[in-house]
């Protein structure tokens, strides 16, 4: 795969990682539809580093406060809103971590078919519309209880199915629990940090075992491109979310799913 193809995929990864439209679906399908060769495991790690950097930089102030209060809670056993949120992010990561380890082979083989992606894209898109339409939208992310967090965490595990969208299903769960749109998006994005770290570590282990030759220039371009596009995506998505709602993304998902059903 040449540099331009990888640059396009890096930009696509950055844009779709945090929009509720499924990054995995786009990254699996675009090379298939365009007839491109596989981008390789090293490139996947590079774009994950880019998107991770984007979300960490965007939420740097919140993460600093959460980390400080979380560390203090270990010593004092007293919690603030920020320490509870930090514990919530860690707790919400457990379901997807366990499911990822147990179902890794199935996810990477049987579930990567265009039919599965198409049906998941449409089905979970409709669920997102229902949650956005029926949700109370009165709570913020600091009000989440342990049971709320586990529900969102289990929803995140469902996103191992390609086409579901990790951000889409966690935002859907948040809206169902009464979160406002920005609050559901913020918690979803914070929840992405340990998930991206875990995915990157697993891919890195596989890369080391494969003893693959690494083209560092290409990887750096991919990481930078995905990082910039992801940062801009997070910024404008949260800023415009209350104004535009979820309907544009739902319509896009339905159209994409129908097109995939027709093609495949």
Image (cartoon, grey):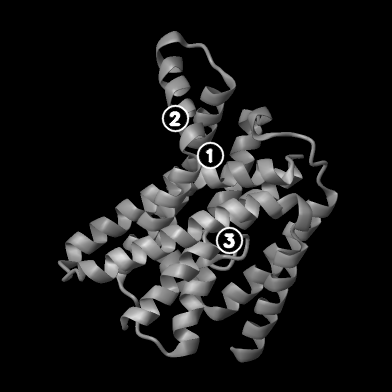
Identify the residue at horizontal 52%, vertical 66% (top origin): 23
Identify the residue at horizontal 44%, vertical 30% (top origin): 64
Q: Give me the disc on residue 165.
A: 3
In this picture, is 172 found above or below 9?
above
Per the image, label 3 sits on a secondary structure element best described as loop
Per the image, label 2 sits on a secondary structure element best described as helix
Residue 84 horizontal side relative to residue 215, left or right? right
Q: CA distance from mark 2 to mark 1?
A: 19 Å
Tell me if mark 1 has few (under 14), some (14-19) or many (20+) residues whose alpha carbon lies within 10 angstroms of its own: many
Name which of mark 3 and mark 2 comes first in the sequence.
2
Q: Which residue is mark 1?
A: 92
Measuring from the top left, give residue 186's x and y in whole percent.
Answer: 60, 43
**Pointers 2 and 1 in contact (C-beta within 8 Å):** no
Identify the residue at horizontal 43%, vertical 16% (top origin): 72
Q: CA distance from mark 1 to mark 3?
A: 16 Å
Name which of mark 2 and mark 1 comes first in the sequence.
2
Identify the residue at horizontal 44%, vertical 9% (top origin): 76
Tell me if mark 3 has few (under 14), some (14-19) or many (20+) residues whose alpha carbon lies within 10 angstroms of its own: many
Tell me if mark 2 has few (under 14), some (14-19) or many (20+) residues whose alpha carbon lies within 10 angstroms of its own: few
């Amino acid at each position: 795969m040449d540099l331009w193809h990888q640059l396009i995929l890096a930009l696509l990864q950055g844009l779709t990682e945090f929009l509720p439209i499924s990054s995995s679906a786009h990254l699996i399908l675009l090379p298939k539809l365009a007839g491109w060769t596989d981008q390789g495991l090293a490139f996947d790690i590079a774009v994950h580093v880019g998107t991770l950097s984007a979300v960490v930089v965007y939420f740097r102030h919140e993460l600093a406060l959460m980390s400080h209060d979380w560390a203090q809670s270990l010593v004092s056993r007293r919690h603030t809103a920020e320490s509870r949120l930090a514990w919530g992010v860690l707790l919400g990561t457990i379901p997807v971590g366990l499911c990822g380890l147990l179902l890794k082979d199935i996810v990477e083989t049987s579930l990567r078919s265009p039919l599965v992606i198409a049906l998941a894209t449409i089905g979970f898109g409709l669920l997102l519309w229902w949650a956005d339409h029926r949700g109370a939208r009165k709570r913020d992310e600091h009000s989440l209880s342990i049971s709320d967090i586990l529900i969102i965490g289990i929803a995140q595990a469902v996103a191992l199915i390609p086409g579901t969208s990790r951000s889409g299903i966690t935002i859907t769960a948040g809206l169902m629990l009464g979160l406002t749109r920005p609050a559901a998006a913020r918690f979803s994005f914070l929840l992405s940090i340990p998930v991206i770290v875990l995915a990157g570590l697993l891919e890195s282990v596989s890369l080391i075992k494969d003893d693959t030759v690494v083209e560092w220039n290409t990887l750096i371009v991919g990481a930078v491109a995905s990082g910039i596009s992801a940062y801009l995506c997070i910024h404008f998505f949260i800023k415009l979310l209350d104004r535009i709602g979820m309907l544009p993304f739902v319509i896009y998902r339905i159209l994409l799913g129908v097109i995939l059903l027709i093609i495949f």
